[in-house]
Amino acid sequence: MLRSTIFFIAFALCAPALHAQTYATGDYTIQTPVGQLRINSGFVAHQNAHSFHVYTFLFRPDDTETWHQVPVIREVDSPTMEFTVTRTATADFTTRDAVVVPHDRGLMLTIATLDYASTPYDAHAVVRTERFRLEQLEEEGRWIFLLDSNDVAPKGHSIEDVIRKAGGVPGGEEKGAL
């Protein structure tokens, strides 16, 4: 019984990460020590290679039934908040994706984006990574994903490589970063 309970808890924590390269349409819940994070994924079809997924985040603290919309913020004092994160691709490869994984530093959102000069097929394109940590602002009690760190992946790495290294995809490094 204990073994199956441990397996279920481990699976529940990692289940959303198994879809890390594209959260399938639907919702995924991650239980944290202070509440539940819900990831909602929707597909926007354009009948061509430019269709994309949109992810939104809701958080419900354990002490309430209220769900909070969780924005992505790069600076605490910045008025700019992103309430959606998109997964985009060319007809050939992913150009942006994100994954949320439990980490020893808290619940982390990793966004990997292909940065290029004029076209995603540029030989000099690189993958930029931003990591955000789920936090509660004291003065407002609001929950946010706040920028924690950013970097550039080594030349030749794909979006999938970066997401895998975030610790969210089988074959990736456990709780690791580039």
Image: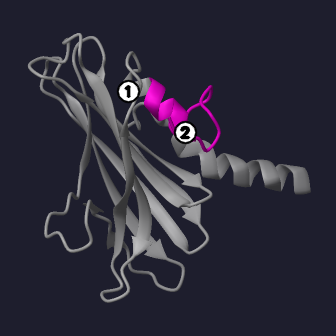
| Image coloring type | one colour
In this view, the residue farthest toward the bottom is 139
Screen quadrant of the N terminus: bottom right
Disc 1 marks which amino acid? Answer: Ile
The secondary element bearing badge 2 is classed as helix
Mark 1 crowdedness (10 Å alpha carbons): few <14, some 14-19, many ≥20: many
Residue 156 appearing in the image: yes
Image position, residue 127 (x, y; %): 32, 29
Residue at position x 43%, y 25% in the image: 160
Given residues 120 and 46, the one toward you in this image is: 120
Q: Is residue 172 magenta?
A: yes
Instruction: Give the magenta range.
Output: 161-178
Residue of label 1: 159
Whether residue 1 is visible: no
Of helix, strand and loop, which one carries label 1?
helix
Residue 148 place in picture, x, y as percent = 40, 58
Q: Residue at x 23, y 13 (%)?
A: 91
Image quadrant where residue 128 sits: top left
The amino acid sitting under disc 2 is: Gly
Q: Residue at the left extreme?
A: 118
**In the drawing, does residue 39 fall left or right of residue 42?**
right
Q: Where does label 2 land, which residue?
A: 168
The residue shown at (13%, 70%) is 79
Q: How far separated are the C-alphas under marks 1 and 2?
A: 13 Å
* Mark found first going from the N terminus, 1 or 2: 1
Q: Position of residue 94 (x, y in %)?
A: 31, 23
Left or right of 154? Residue 128 is left
